[in-house]
Image: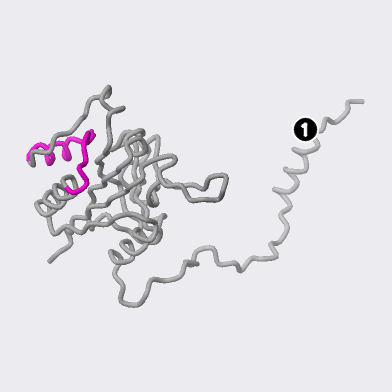
Amino acid sequence: MEQTTSKEKILKKVRAALIFKSKSKYANIDLESNVYEQPPVGESILETFARNFTETQGQFVVCDNKFDCVDKLLTLIERKKLKNIYCLENQLQEMLADSGIAYLHQKEQLPKAMVGITTCETLVARTGSVLISSAKNSRVLTVYPPTHIVIAYASQVVMEIKDSLQILKNRYGRNMPSMISFITGPSRTSDIERKLVTGAHGPKELFVFLINDLKQ
């Protein structure tokens, strides 16, 4: 007589469970409603993002238009004496070149980078996070330089993480980027003495320059 193996016993129980399903004790659980606390009454989605972003030690700069963004970017570079700015995206390279801002872009120059400038996929108001992907940005560029500057638009702000993921799905379909990352404030961790260390595994400073393209 053939012996039933442990694997066969397990598979038999699984098949039986799939055929004879027991009634759920918690059939009325609501898994769709939003469980998060709602923003204060009268607060716009942009204000919600700004509040949550700055609470995570991010630095937020509102820009009226692209020209205002360039002007404020130049001010930041001069004030903080930023050097070795690295940028890979064509549209940002054109903006920097037109403004007379020198930048690095060759692969072998990356170890010299002190500032990384990128765009993003979306901004998440609920968590104050920046969603980036490998479709637009280098994997290394968003974590290697000590300062990360994100150029974004007000129209990219969504309330929830699920909204960001839906936008990615609509944008890329089956060709999803190989890497997506939600950045919530500068890199930080706790050391062995329970002290908060900023910039341990990524940028010490995170800036978002938000261009208001929703103005009437």
| Residue 144 in the image, given as x and y percentages of width and height | 35, 35
Magenta span: 79-98
| Residue 58 in the image, given as x and y percentages of width and height | 33, 54
Name the residue furthest front.
193
> Badge 1: how crowded within 10 Å, few (<14), some, or many (20+)?
few
Disc 1: which residue: 7
Q: In which quarter of the image is residue 114?
A: top left
Q: Nearer the viewer, residue 201 or 21?
A: 201
| Residue 135 in the image, given as x and y percentages of width and height | 31, 36
Name the residue furthest top.
108
Callout count: 1
| Image position of 2 (left or right of 148) | right
Residue 96 is a magenta residue: yes
As displayed, is residue 61 above or below residue 111? Answer: below
Q: Which residue is drawn at 51% across and 50% down?
A: 195
| Residue 71 in the image, given as x and y percentages of width and height | 11, 51
| Image position of 11 (left or right of 128) | right
Image quadrant for the N terminus? top right
Look at the numbered disc 1 and give the secondary structure of its residue. Answer: helix
Q: Which residue is drawn at 81% across and 37% down?
A: 9
Q: In which quarter of the image is residue 113?
A: top left
Image quadrant for the C terminus? bottom left
As displayed, is residue 21 above or below residue 38? Answer: above
Q: Residue at x 17, y 48 (%)?
A: 73
* Identity, as a three-letter code, of the amino acid under mark 1: Lys
Name the residue furthest bottom.
41
As displayed, is residue 68 above or below residue 29? Answer: above
